[in-house]
Image (cartoon, grey):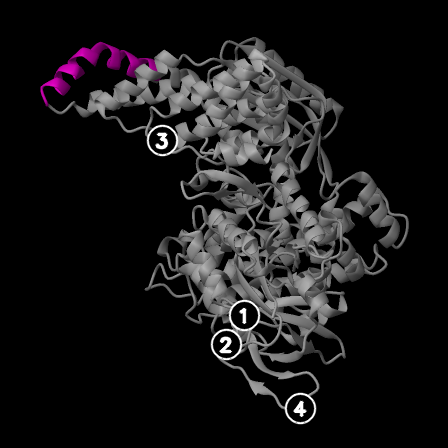
Amino acid sequence: MERYLCIHGHFYQPPRENPWLEAVEIQDSAHPYHDWNERITAECYAPNTATRILDGDMRIVDIISNYARISFNFGPTVLSWMEHNTPEVYKAIRESDRQSMQWRSGHGNAIAQAYNHMIMPLANRRDKTTQVIWGIKDFSYRFGRNPEGMWLPETAVDIDTLEVLAGNGITFTLLAPRQASRTRKIGTGKWKDVKGSRLDPSMPYLCRLPSGRKIVIFFYDGPISQAVAFENLLNRGEDFANRLLSGFSDARQWPQILSIATDGESYGHHHRFGDMALAHAVNHIESNGLARLSNYGEYLEKHPPTHEVEIFERSSWSCVHGIERWRSDCGCNSGGYAHWDQQWRQPLREALDWLREQITFRYESTGKTLLKNPWQARNEYISVVLDRSEDSISRFFAQHSRTQLSREEKTTALKLLEMQRHAMLMYTSCGWFFDELSGLETVQIIQYAGRAIQLCEDITKGRIEDQFKIRLGRAKSNIPEHGDGARIYEKFVKPAMIDLKKVGAHFAISSLFTDYREKPDIFSYEVSQDDFHRIEAGKTKLALGRISVMSRITLDAELISFCVLHMGDHALNGGVRTFIGDEAYSSMKAEISRAFEQGAFADIIRLMDQHFGMNNYSLAHLFRDEQRKILRLIIEQTLDEFRAAYRTMYNSNRLLMGFFHETGMPVPKEFRAAAGFTLNFDIREMFLGETMDVDRVQDLARDMKRWDFPLDSVDIEFTVRHRLENIMEMLQDAPGDIPLMTEVRNMLEVIRLFPIDINYWQVQNFYYRIAKTVYRDFSAKANSGDAEAVQWRSIFKYIGEMLYFDINAVLEET
């Protein structure tokens, strides 16, 4: 009988966007990357678009896309981030789905996901419906087709959720084997008890619903999936392939499908090089005819269900107690702190449930005056979330507004809809999954709640925040200094809140250091400069002006006047207020400008207090990324002085250090600190420069080895890798450029002088593309006696060897 293999990867990350900026700010824990989305993309999402197939000598013989060979889903919030931040990876994932449709009888490998990873059985019917509709429309927007299947967050399921899936055209979903209660062959009366994961997962099952609808459920192989995620099965591709094949049985008399499912991040992020183990396994199985790679849609078309199933309601794949992990102290946790409890989960959910009801009442009462059907409008609002353009917003209101709305009314309607969006985002499952109330994932969902509250109070002019904090205060942290949810809200949520004045303050302060265009974008806001002046006197700078700040999300706008004084270092004072008229603005501008020209800086501070009152701002009020950038500019001269001092200490004492070394005496740590810093700095700068002095780099490498100084490997690897990637990208655009190719060769040779493990993934991709597109032509010219082509081919092959390619295999295929 036929054997089908379907490996499913659930690719998802907790949301990390600042709810007020709609962007991920810098995260130090992800260093040397900007944030964890960027880091996990580099470690997992990107490598799976171009994964290496290795031979027995660990040389690359081919590069393939895993996404074109496995079933997968991506969280919509991850794809949204990817679309704007790593478009080449985003494009490759979509292209892989299109490729799979050609290979899998018109069925794509990608399936949808309920929108923001909400635990569906704990949601009300409205939220379930919107989550499914948004998941479908987000998928269609990205993949250009309707989804056949949908992944349920944490595979959490109940009958009502299945009804919503089936009612919206979803054909199948995927569950854990322990979520099946009983099965039977279709058309027979006798049920078989399969509690305790005793179900046979090698076939699909029909699930009949109370409404008369039906949905197909695939159950993944539990033991093999567990081994992939937690038992180091991805250490060797051969072991992975053999374990997959062990899931088939000759005793089965039907076309069996072996299905496994894990977090997609297993393939590269949780397990380094897991993407290559996956590629090796599927390549081995497919090329040797041991099973047919397939996806759920294709298998269903060929082999409809012969059996039906009844499920355990309110069950999931990551909580043995059902869905208690997301509402109670059930005992499921990350296992890091045995003395902690998770009693905070229940009051957190109760506080959010209370907030949802408060928001619902206000949404309905205000929304019905502006929108024909507020809940239908919410379901369709995903079109605006996906496309914030003026045309998209106009189309939305043309369809859903009760009457012709004024700009102010449109802003109110958009605020209502954004309030609802954040009221769903605050239920993202990650907020309850881990161990501690003050954890990043939980603070994130409380920030979503804070944004929903801010919008609600802005629309209705009523107060609900205080009552919310009282309820949140019933959730107790395991960390004494954090106290409870109310204190966490004040400590981590309130300071993150942003209004239009704070955006104006960010522009005002940063305008002292940045030359903005007339209408700059600041994250999800647009600033229009109506009047702007910057004056400098030595190290002292003054900026003042009038700007309009508009949210591109809600279209809310405010006219703002400002003045900022920088007197060097971090001494900066700023005033921002709502524009109150030309007369007051002209007076402020004239008085402060005059005081600056006179050098009366104390008078400027007094005048700022007079004109702006308590609306004072400093460098502390900048958004995090710009704050880092500006502080770096401010201290650059000081850093140069430190570097010069270290260099002087090293150069002045180098001979003495040599004496210590030759006599076997330990080099004083003060000497080592100065020398280690200087050498690491010089190595990094050498790779950053426009040209590289190979002899100088060799000297630096010898010094590092002689003194046995630790290399700043993380930062230098990051620097070297990106330099190489930039050169290889230029070479891809001009493949015949021999000097450029020579530079690549020299860099690769120099890198070998240092104890550093370079991630050549992108560099190898560029090389592979050149090999597949132009190598044949250059080789033909070389064979005909073209001296330049002979040189080109020789260098190109040498580079391939240094990049760990099996040159004969890769170049033969061209």
Residue topped by disc 1: 176
Mark 1, other Cα within 10 Å: few <14 / some 14–19 / many ≥20? many
Q: Amino acid at mark 4?
A: Gly
What percent of the width, then of the height, locates residue 664? 10, 23
Residue topped by disc 4: 189
Foreground residue among 173 and 201: 201
What percent of the width, then of the height, locates residue 518? 71, 22
Quadrant the C terminus occupies: top right
Residue 705 appears in the figure = yes
Considering the whole magenta stretch, tell me its main secondary structure.
helix
Disc with the residue nearer the chain's start (2 vs 1): 1
Report the residue that reaches farthest toward the front: 784
Q: Secondary structure at mark 3?
A: loop
Q: Residue at x 25, y 15 (%)?
A: 650
Q: Amino acid at mark 1?
A: Ala
The answer to which image quadrant residue 185 occupies is bottom right
Q: Residue at x 61, y 69 (%)?
A: 218
- Give the side of residue 673 with respect to residue 159, left or right: left
Q: Amino acid at mark 3?
A: Ile
Q: Secondary structure at mark 4?
A: loop
Give the spatial CA distance, label 2 vs label 3: 47 Å
The answer to which image quadrant residue 639 occupies is top left
Foreground residue among 439 and 254: 254
Give the spatial CA distance, label 3 vs label 1: 42 Å
Quadrant the N terminus occupies: bottom right
Give the spatial CA distance, label 2 vs label 1: 8 Å
- Give the side of residue 654 with respect to residue 259, left or right: left
Disc with the residue nearer the chain's start (3 vs 1): 1
Disc with the residue nearer the chain's start (1 vs 4): 1
Residue topped by disc 3: 756
